[in-house]
């Protein structure tokens, strides 16, 4: 079972981290993120950062890789949310 544990960890990391990909793609395609909660994204990123630190302290590669990938995805969502909010505000100001 010891040899199986890293494989299970990698698979779990791929599935849970990969779950962010559809949201990133959808947000990029639609160019709006109004419905995404900024607090949820920030708290999730902070939690994943703590998991990353924990994984580094254990030298656990699956935990480290999964959290790095997730942090990149959710940081991208935060950036898109901020950018698209500014674009929507600018568009509204042009109309006024």
Image (cartoon, grey):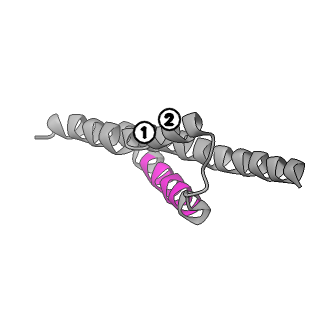
- Check disc 2 and report its element: helix, strand or loop: helix
Q: Quadrant of the C terminus?
A: bottom right
Q: Position of residue 21 (x, y in %)?
A: 44, 37
The circle drawn on residue 25 is 2
- In the rendered image of this protein, does residue 10 appear above or below residue 90? above
**Residue at which label 1 appears:** 22
Whether pointer 1 and pointer 2 mark residues with C-beta atoms closer than 8 Å, the reply is: yes
Q: Residue 35 colored magenta?
A: no
Left or right of 63: which side holds 29? right
Classify residue 66 by image quadrant: top left
Left or right position of 52 against 87: left
Task: Residue at 33%, 36% (x, y): give it.
Answer: 14
Looking at the image, which residue is at 44% across and 43% down? 20
Whether residue 17 appears in this view of the structure is yes
Label 1 Cα crowd, 10 Å radius (few <14 / some 14-19 / many 20+)? few
Residue 28 percent coordinates (x, y): 58, 36
Q: Residues within 10 Å of mark 2 (few under 14, many from 20)?
A: few
Q: Nearer the viewer, residue 46 or 62?
A: 46
Main SS of the magenta part reads helix
* Nearest to the observer: residue 28 or residue 6: 28
Residue 11 is left or right of residue 70, and the answer is left
Quick one: which residue is furthest to the left in this view?
1
Quadrant of the image containing the N terminus: top left
Range of residues picked out in magenta: 42-55
Q: Residue at x 46, y 44 (%)?
A: 67
**Residue at 47% from the left image edge and 45% from the top image edge:** 56
Q: Can residue 64 be seen in this snapshot?
A: no
> Count the marks: how many?
2
Q: Quadrant of residue 65?
A: top left
Secondary structure of the residue carrying tag 1 is: helix
Rendering coords of residue 51 (x, y %): 45, 54
In three-dimensional space, the C-alpha distance between marks 1 and 2, rounded to whole angstroms, equals 5 Å
């Amino acid at each position: 079972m010891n040899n199986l544990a890293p494989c299970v960890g990698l698979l779990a990391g791929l599935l849970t981290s990969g779950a962010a990909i559809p949201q990133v793609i959808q947000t990029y395609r639609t160019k709006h993120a109004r419905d995404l909660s900024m607090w949820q994204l920030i708290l999730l990123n902070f939690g994943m950062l703590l998991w990353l630190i924990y994984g580094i302290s254990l030298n656990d590669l699956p935990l480290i890789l999964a959290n790095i990938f997730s942090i990149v995805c959710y940081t991208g969502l935060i950036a898109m949310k901020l950018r698209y909010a500014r674009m929507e505000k600018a568009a509204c100001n042009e109309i006024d």
